[in-house]
Image: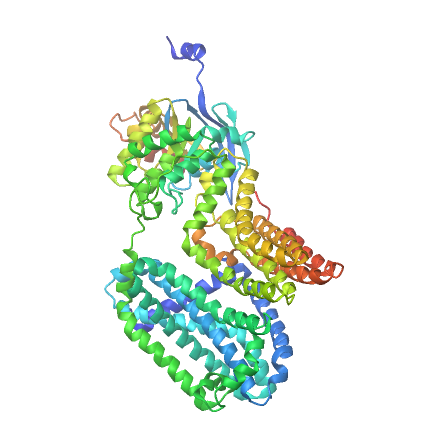
Amino acid sequence: MSQRMQQAMFPQKFALEISGLRKAFDRPAVDGLDLKVREGEFYALLGPNGAGKTTTLRMVAGLLRPDSGAISVSGIDALADPVAAKQIMAWISDEPMIYDKLTPREYLEFVAGLWGIAPDVAEARTQDLLSWLDLTAHANERCEGFSKGMRQKVALAGALVHDPRVIILDEPLTGLDAGSARQVKSVLRERVDAGGTIVMTTHILEVAERMADRIGVIAHGRLIAEGTLDELRIAAGAQAGVNAVASATLEDTFLALVAEQAQAA
Amino acid sequence: MTAAPGTTIWFAQHESRLAWRDWLSMITAGRRERLRRVAIAILVFAVFMHFVAYWMVGPYADAAIDKSMLVTISGSILLSWLLMVSQAMETMTRAFYSRSDLDLILASPVAANKLFAIRITTIAIAMAAMAVPLAAPFINILIVQGGWHWLGAYGLIVAMGATSTALAVGLTVALFRLIGPKRTRLAAQIVAAVIGAAFVIGLQVAAILSYGTISRASVLQSQAVLAHAPDLDSIVWWPARAALGDIIPLVGVLALGLALLGIAIVLVAPRFGEYALVAAGTGNFSHAGARRQTAFRPASPQAALRRKEWLLLRRDPWLVSQTLMQMLYLIPPAVLLWHSFDNGNGAYALLVPVLVMASGQLAGGLAWLTISGEDAPDLVATAPVPPRFILRAKVEAVLGVIGIVFTPLVAVLALASPWHALIAATGIIIATAAATSIQLWFRGQFKRSQFRRRQVSSRVATFAEAFSSIGWAATAAVASASLILAVAPAILASLVVLGARFMAPRQS
């Protein structure tokens, strides 16, 4: 069955649809961005510093109002009905924001309360998540003495305790040691395997290369390339006027795409 | 010209540059373009304060020196000095516990004791520098009206800065060694708050118990105190005489102050790094299982927010100690209430404005903590709860605490005088609503740990909150006697609140 026929018979559902998104501060940060992420997809958003990745994701999470454009989360207009969109979403930034004076258990109870999760369900999920993330031994300690990795894991548990369909992550692996990073990656992969959708920015290209189903490259607030790693290689080769190099790493491809964009600009 | 790296002068240059930039940032709230406006405002305020000082102390510039005068001056000096000790202890504790650049300094090959000697000296200079703007208008007026000998008061301020810092260093290190680094942080905060308030409160409590009034001047000017005061030539009066410009007492207190500061530096500076390292090593881990694990309770998002705010307030002794100072000032009115209740001498009218003022101040601090001091703003903002519900829950958390603190006092007052209790309750509600509203209109996004610097974030909010609390306290005081007359101060207080609303930035 051809891809076109398959799409006609089983229309794709998008977990995230962004169209014509604009946001300017002193200068345009996001400049007419269009982006679609399928349900059950692990999508990595790459770009140089100041490309507009974090601004985009903050608008999706409802932390910034766009100047114009549309955002839809699993069919819900996130700008018209932000509460409904937030109900099925979770947001984690590179700097884990948790309360020093609460224990992980209390933090998760608070988050569950915010999302209106029934106490028995929240408690069962809390136990699973704490165990999954190796936090059970620290469940009743206040977070104030936790390392960056432990804090990030608590934040991740908070993001998962309300069982979100779409998880938005901004540099979630920054500053994590190898063990913690592997745990977080494994938890994220399992969420995708279970049907969840993940949209993640990262500077660690190896993570995007290994984990992402599709990769979007953003520069100057616009999507300049998108696809699987192979598709990006071809795009980078086409832009450079050469054949795609099959062995090119994502780093080579990314740098080629960004350099092309910089020249064009 | 820059001194050779690693020398004491080089460190002094480094510290003074940091202190200058910190001060600039503090007075301009981080916006350099405001500097000119701030400078003009300071100038206008200084001129205004000189008029106030002329009115207050001008007539006394040439007054004869007698015991009554020495007692009054000594009382004022002691009060100011205790406040300086309190502030110096607070600064010292922060120096031990905040890491800032300590890691860099301790990891470098320079002799860190030189820097720490400079830092202790800087605290002493800061203490004196903080007192000068407040005292200068009064001293200047006394110099103009009474003669150059009043210049000695500036020398006394230097001595007070040195001795208060020396004592603060000694007390903090003593606490450190006595109860350990983990408990010292909180203990030092509490001791600092108590030291700062104890003298005023002590005088007020003594005045209430002896004379049935809350005025501390009644104790200082009482026959009992004057009769037991030492002779005019006693060394006890040296600080007061130094302020009056007597050379020998001035040289004496200056020498004592600088000597004590020198001793503190010599004894503590070499060990400062060691103390800082120990303080850094005090983990904040609680033992697993030490905290009772309770089952999750059902809660609406608003209830979860309220519960979280109360839990965080309860668990943060540092913040509690920051608000302790305000609560300590409730002790005299509580004693007055108890005393009046016992004697039936009808001094309830004095209580009403104190309660109203305290409620406004406490509500302002709590409202900043709950509304602006959110450590996980992204989490709360991405929760599926309309923003107005979040704000409402946070305001309810503030009102809950105010209710718990003030309801018992109003209830006891109601037993003695229902009318005054009604006025106090109304005033508390209005002052709390006004202070909370101001914090709501000027809300920002800060860490709770930035509580100390909340005044810096918006000068308008700070002044509006203070003037609103004063205005409603005055309204309540007048209303105790006449409701008609209370209309005027009520209008003024309302104008303050409306002005704040008008000047508040637009919230997105």
- Residue, x 54% and y 82% (percent of image)? B224
Quadrant in which the N terminus of chain B appears: bottom left
Can residue B489 be seen in the rendering of this structure?
yes
- Residue, x 47% and y 38% (percent of image)? B304
Looking at the image, residue B158 lies above or below residue B119: below
In the image, residue B42 lies at what x, y percent? 57, 68
Can residue A219 be seen in the rendering of this structure?
no
In the image, residue B33 lies at what x, y percent? 54, 59
Q: Quadrant of residue A54?
A: top left
**A69 left or right of B449 in image:** right
- Residue, x 47% and y 42% (percent of image)? B307
Looking at the image, residue A62 lies above or below residue B487: above
Quadrant in which the C terminus of chain B appears: top right
Looking at the picture, the colour scheme in use is rainbow
Looking at the image, residue B220 lies above or below residue A167: below
**B271 left or right of B358 in image:** left
In the image, residue A10 lies at what x, y percent? 43, 12
Q: Nearer the viewer, residue B297 or B501?
A: B297
Q: Quadrant of residue B39?
A: bottom right
Q: Name the residue furthest top.
A: A1
Q: Nearer the viewer, residue B339 or A224?
A: B339
In the image, residue B199 lies at what x, y percent? 48, 71
**B2 left or right of B67 in image:** left
Q: How many marks?
A: 0
